[in-house]
Image: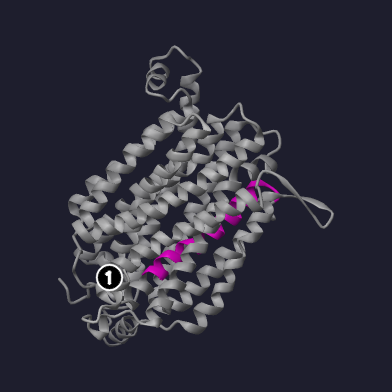
Amino acid sequence: MADLMLSDSTPERERMTPYHWWVLIIGSCSWLFDCMDARIFILCRQPALKQLMPGATDLQISQAGDCVTAAMMVGWAVGGLFFGIVGDKWGRVRTLSTSVFVYSMFTGLSGLSQTWYDFCLWRFLMGCGIGGAFATAATLIAETLPQRLRALALGSFQALSALGNITGSAVSTWLIKPALTIPLFGYDVPGWRLLFGFGIFPALLIVLIMRTIKEPDQWHQARKTAREQLDRQMGDLKSMMGHPRWRRNATVGVLLAVAGAAGLWGVGFYTPELISEALKGATPKEVNFVRGFGTMIQDCGALLGMFFFTFLALRIGRRAAFAFCFFMAYVVVTFVFLNLNSARHTYWMTPAVGFATLSVFGGYSIYFPEIFPTRLRATGTAICYNVARIITAAFIVAQAPMKSFFNDLFANEHSPVTRFFASIGAPTPFRAVAVVMCLIYFVGIVTLLWAPETRGKPLPTDDDR
């Protein structure tokens, strides 16, 4: 990689400078800490709801967990759309700073929740900040770094976000266990509350963003053009949806993102619950350790998966890489949710889930900025990623009645449905629902029929028709 970035034969304008490295580091850190906060939520969701809903049944807690997750996803979408449009109008740097502040502060406030209703509210507001960080940081990196290195940089940006997930998992496994209470200043404080407090620290990144990063030249040029030509305004959603090329690209991006996000948040991120079900006879201490360690190595798999997608995209193109990784995700996730039945299984199956489900996310950070012009790049990227979040939230909420439906079916152990799922390795409603939900990955594969190939091409402009 060093040779690629620093070759003596590389033209000066295509070489990596210290400033390019700094933008890549800061942009990656903003998304890394974002993912750390999201991982903390995944691990704290069940312990928090058990305390906030005393006397609730497992099914009620599971349904509340779906609602809280959906609220965060809707916030992710709303904030992403808002900050995406604002990112084109205000500029990348100021928008990124604001989004980091929002997701940090409301992660901290989640630890002060008294009921599952206000917990749901804080997660919605925290999601608003997460949504803004991805689109703005990806756009900033895409417009700042040399074209020759754009795909590699954006793939690395997304892949390094897995370190945020790993950090969240490591902290909850060895430092602050979410299901246990910790003595602090004479009080027994639930671990999940302290973990959410830990999520405030990314706010410190704001100082570095505001003081050391400048707006890309492409943004300044697009802003100048917008002042001179009224039909080319920055972040103009109407003009984007009115242009056939940008409208088609937005639709393709949304559907690709729906396939990956729904598969991840609707199934892939439920491995902690899968582990709990598989280890029902184990002690709480063992279950907590395996859950925490399992999610951490799942994140290690995700890191490798996103680098794997980047390698594929550079070698065989974006469309072929997406097709391969969507199909891989379907096969791997279905296999794991049918076969994970012990702690030993966890140590090789959860990394496989991480590798498969997160690989396509490496593609989103590369592909979405490549299919929109400068004046619409943050807006378009935000639409792709965050309209998909709204659809994903509906997908997750739909799991609640589906779980109830399968619970009723499985109440009769002699029914054809129960016997069918038991025969393929899904003897419980939870596993059966996961297997059905995995079919969403085929939406992504079909969508690729209309997706443009961008490998080796410069970022588009409004002059491209």
* Quadrant housing residue 351: top left
| Image quadrant in which the N terminus is located | bottom left
Q: In this view, does 37 lie to the left or right of 220?
A: right
Which residue lies most toward the right here? 186
Which residue lies most toward the top here? 414
Q: In this view, does 239 lie above or below 188?
A: below
- Residue at left offset 45%, top offset 30%: 431
Task: Measuring from the top left, give residue 144's x and y in whole percent.
Answer: 34, 78
* Quadrant housing residue 307: bottom left
Amino acid marked by disc 1: Ser
Q: Which of 195 and 350 is in front in this view?
A: 350
Q: Which of 451 and 454 is in front in this view?
A: 454
* Quadrant housing residue 4: bottom left
Which residue lies under the disc numbered 1?
A: 239
- Residue at left offset 32%, top offset 76%: 143
Element carrying mark 1: helix
Q: Is residue 164 above or below residue 402?
A: below
Does 137 appear in magenta? yes
- Residue at left offset 27%, top offset 58%: 311
Does 132 appear in magenta? yes
Q: Is residue 222 left or right of residue 190?
A: left
Range of magenta residues:
114-138
Q: Mainly helix, strand or loop, the magenta region?
A: helix
Q: Is residue 87 left or right of residue 184?
A: left
| Image quadrant in which the C terminus is located | bottom left
Task: Measuring from the top left, give residue 251's x and y in whole percent.
Answer: 27, 56
Q: In this view, does 120 lie above or below 58?
A: below
Task: Measuring from the top left, give residue 412's x and y in whole percent.
Answer: 48, 15
Task: Measuring from the top left, give residue 402's x and y in whole percent.
Answer: 45, 32
